[in-house]
Image (spheres, rainbow, N blue to C red):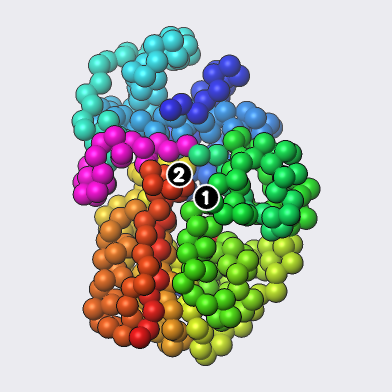
């Protein structure tokens, strides 16, 4: 369950991690990557940064226990207390190491609530409990699965597996998983566009699209972001248009398309055969990769996402599509089935022809929801 490679760990890593956690404690809605980037000294090498990050993430993976126990202690002491106690609770040897570094910390016994035991705030725990038992929730929140890539030319599969010690996953010819977390973006093959970093969940979901939506269809990827889903769909479709309300993200998509030799459209037309909505959401399907997001999401934010998801579905009608493909990386019904059901209640010409929740438990991939609607 721990990410930290204790063999290489040094006092400095602990202290920088503590600093990061103190900053995050007072601004839990700030993206953790930005806090780490601004806090870690530029002189720190990439391995040291990774170690700092792993100490931070290890602590966050047990954060709810800290919140349950440390509410009254104040920021500085809470963080020290949380780190020391959490490590002590899980591994006594590590605790001894930590106590040498922060000698003033008194270790007190922890109270562990059922929600704390699975590292979820109570309101999120209730959502998970609607579908899963505690053991399954732990499997979702703590899933570990390496880095997924999509080969642009499956012909190089054998060489790729040898070079990166990768294995073919998901029953898809282009999907591969690597064990470590090497910085792939520096690799020559990546820079040549021979492969892309892409979650298995997205690859499976886009393969489902290819099963249900004819391959001659024109597709509008309306929440295209950096183009991940379009790049994946380009294995099956030729006529793909990308749109996103954030034009900076689209610039990134243009670059990726160029590197990978894809010819996408960026001008909106009036009509498309299919509209893909990869909607903004709570991101709960990725909590295992970004544990700090567990503590930045609120019920209010989830309501805001629901509103955006609803508006995007309404918007898609303007393109008169035969197919609407609705996706989120959320595990929660209220962002998935419920949104789709409500949409169909008001637009009965659309019927559900496929829907699926992919999870680490069922497909050994990130959490991802897909619904494909067809107009009859
Ligand atoms: C989950 S991300 C999409 C990720 C992207 N499809 C990919 O595979 O890399 C959601 C995207 O929706 C965009 N978005 C949010 N509200 C939108 C709106 N009203 N219209 C269009 N795009 C929107 C965001 O800018 C963001 O890029």
Q: Which region of the structure is painted magenta? A: 122-144
The crowd level at tag 2 (other Cα within 10 Å; few <14, some 14-19, many 20+) is some
Q: Quadrant of residue 166?
A: top right
In this rendering, would 318 be left or right of 347? right
Count neighbours of disc 1 (C-alpha within 10 A) and say few if under 14, some if 14 to 19, many if 20 or more.
some
Q: Secondary structure at mark 2?
A: loop
Q: Which residue is depicted at the point 50% across and 39% down?
A: 145
Residue 68's x, y, as percent? 24, 31
CB of mark 1 near ligand 1 (< 8 Å): no
Question: Toward the viewer: 267 or 211?
Answer: 211
Across and down, in percent, residue 198 comes to 58, 53
* Mark toward the start of the polypeptide (1 vs 2): 1
**Residue 362 seen in this snapshot:** yes
Query: Chief secondary structure of the magenta span?
Result: helix
299 or 180, which is in the foreground?
Answer: 180
58 versus 32 height, above or below: above
Q: Is residue 159 magenta?
A: no
Q: Is residue 299 above or below residue 141?
A: below
Q: Are marks 1 and 2 in contact (CB under 8 Å)?
A: yes
Read off the residue under disc 1.
Answer: 170
**Residue marked by disc 2:** 364
Residue 129 within the magenta-colored segment of the rendering: yes
């Amino acid at each position: 369950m721990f990410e930290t490679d204790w063999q290489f760990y040094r006092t400095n890593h602990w202290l920088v991690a503590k600093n990061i956690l103190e900053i995050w404690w007072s601004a839990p809605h700030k993206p953790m990557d930005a806090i780490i980037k601004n806090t870690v000294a530029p002189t720190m090498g990439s391995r040291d940064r990774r170690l700092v990050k792993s100490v931070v993430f290890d602590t966050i993976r047990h954060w709810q226990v800290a919140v349950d126990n440390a509410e009254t202690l104040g920021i500085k002491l809470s963080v020290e207390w949380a780190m020391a106690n959490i490590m002590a609770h899980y591994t006594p040897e590590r605790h001894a190491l930590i106590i040498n570094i922060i000698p003033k910390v008194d270790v007190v016994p922890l109270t562990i609530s059922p929600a704390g035991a699975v590292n979820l705030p109570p309101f999120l725990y209730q959502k998970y409990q609607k579908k899963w038992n505690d053991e399954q929730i732990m499997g979702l929140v703590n899933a570990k699965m390496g880095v997924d890539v999509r080969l642009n030319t499956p012909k190089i599969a054998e060489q790729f597996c040898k070079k990166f010690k990768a294995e073919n996953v998901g029953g898809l010819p282009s999907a591969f998983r690597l064990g470590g977390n090497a910085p792939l973006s520096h690799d020559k093959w990546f820079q040549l566009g021979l492969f892309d970093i892409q979650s298995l969940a997205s690859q499976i979901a886009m393969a489902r699209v290819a099963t249900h939506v004819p391959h001659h269809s024109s597709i509008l990827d309306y929440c295209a972001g950096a183009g991940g889903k379009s790049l994946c769909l380009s294995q099956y479709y030729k006529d793909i248009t990308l749109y996103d309300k954030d034009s900076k993200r689209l610039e990134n998509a243009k670059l990726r398309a160029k590197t990978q030799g894809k010819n996408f459209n960026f001008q909106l037309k009036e009509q498309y055969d299919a509209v893909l909505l990869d909607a903004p959401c709570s991101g709960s399907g990725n909590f295992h990769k970004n544990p700090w997001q567990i503590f930045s999401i609120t019920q209010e934010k989830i309501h805001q996402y629901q509103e955006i998801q609803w508006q995007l579905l309404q918007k898609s009608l303007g393109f008169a599509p035969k197919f609407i493909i609705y996706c989120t990386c959320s595990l929660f019904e209220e962002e998935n089935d419920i949104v789709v059901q409500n949409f169909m209640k008001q637009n009965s010409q659309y019927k559900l022809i496929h829907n699926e929740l992919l999870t680490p438990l069922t497909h050994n991939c990130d959490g991802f929801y897909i619904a494909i609607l067809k107009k009859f």
